[in-house]
Amino acid sequence: MINLKKLNKAYILVIFLFTTSFTFAQEGKLIDGVIAVVGDKILLKSELENQVAALKAQGMLIDNEARCQITEELLFQKLMLHQAELDSVNVTDAQVDNEMNRRLNYFISQVGSEKKLEQYYKKTIQEIKDELKSSIKDQLIGQTMQQNITSGIKVTPKEVKTYFESLPEDSIPLISSEIQISQILVLAKQSKDAREIAKDRLNTIRERILKGEQFSTLAVLYSEDEGSAKRGGELGFLGRADLVPEFSAALFKLKDNKIVTDIVETQFGFHIIQMIERRGQKVNSRHILIKIKNDEQEIQKAKNLADSLYTLLQTDTFTIGQLALKYSDDEKTKKSDGLLVNPQTGTSIFEIEDVDPQIYYIVENMKSGEISKPFPAETADGKKGYRIIKLINKTEPHKATFETDYAKIHEAAMATKNIEAINNWIKEKLKVSYVKIDDEFKSCEYENNWVK
């Protein structure tokens, strides 16, 4: 178990920014109450309990001291939101929607599908979005405020070395095994017969709708979009950027309650679409999706091609980057030598436990420079094929050293300096901000003078 009180403030802030409000209680409603008022912002007991639940779900031990620390972080968030209003700091709806979709896509990839996510939280995707929206907006405003507070802060190599040398021996961090990976992804082509079968099936459904049957009823019965089918195909209010381009282009041409005249093809399959309602730049719509089934013969062809590419790689005639550019079906990596990018950091470095489970079990026992034999792969939208992995580099778990882990030590030194700037900002703002804390929470030993 991890004890929260041993974590530094910067790490806790990261947890708050990425896990907050994704715990929306499955355990029934809390009896709510007010912990504090900061400026014109109210901190509720339910907010504290949601944060505690999120951290416990990650295996962290939460004692009274940790609860006080979480409470102080929430007070800090409220202070930032209050000050953001005074400073006219805001974020756009597009920023909120993009961040919401990024988080949802991440969690969907972790649990396997939209349906599984809905089952876990006992809510529809739209209900999850509705609950997330307000808190994500507050978090993005908080991020902007923190960036404003810490902008311009730098650390020199000398400061990094001084920071590292000041760490007690038992505080020098352990560095997990880290890897860099390149890949070639060969997906099965969609056969002409499979495409025609899917299209004919959807055309039959479309004709039934045109003859008067309910779109929503047929969506429940036949749509292969697990997330929306049980809601009659309804997607909820979304903007253009929330949808794949082909779908968006067709949808935004429609008038209320109109069905798109032609079948629309996207990366997910074939769709028919119904516009329900427009609200400004967002629309609510329904769709029925019929996927193009994987053809076993095409999957075998993908395997044969992957086997041939693997044989070429063994001759050292071609690099994995050269073959990825010509043959890989992963548009995100094929033009960058097949190099995978960690979506959490934006770099090519992964902690080995964080890679896709399909890849983890392959690279776990590989050595640096080794190339895997082709193995089965499946994309998030259900396409099947084969993947070849090259493990470019792999480090062993070790205690950090200044020479080998400078980047991480630099990051820690920068975080420490940022925390100092944030604490100084808090001290200054508390001198001029109204703060009232409930008696129950006054006994906490806060870092800053919240109890006046």
Image (tube, grey):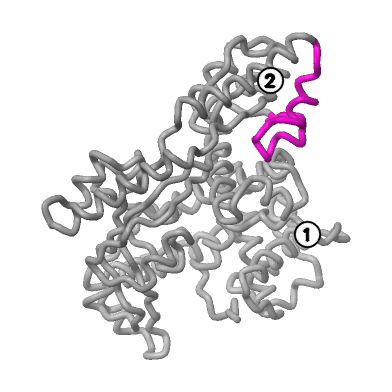
Task: State the quadrant of the C terminus.
Answer: bottom right
Q: Quadrant of residue 412?
A: bottom left
x then y, percent, for residue 246: 50, 22
Task: State the quadrant of the N terminus.
Answer: bottom right
Looking at numbered disc 1 in the image, what kind of residue is underneath it?
A: Ser
x then y, percent, for residue 178: 35, 69
Do tag 2 and tag 1 residues touch (Cβ < 8 Å)?
no
Residue wearing tag 2: 279
Q: Earlier in the sequence, mark 2 or mark 1?
A: 1
Which stretch did the figure color magenta? 212-236
**Label 2's element?**
strand
Q: Residue at x 45, y 30 (%)?
A: 191
Residue wearing tag 1: 46
Q: Quadrant of residue 444?
A: bottom right
Vertical relation: 247 (above or below) 133: above
Vertical relation: 436 (above or below) 95: below
Q: Residue at x 82, y 61 (%)?
A: 27
Looking at numbered disc 2 in the image, what kind of residue is underneath it?
A: Arg
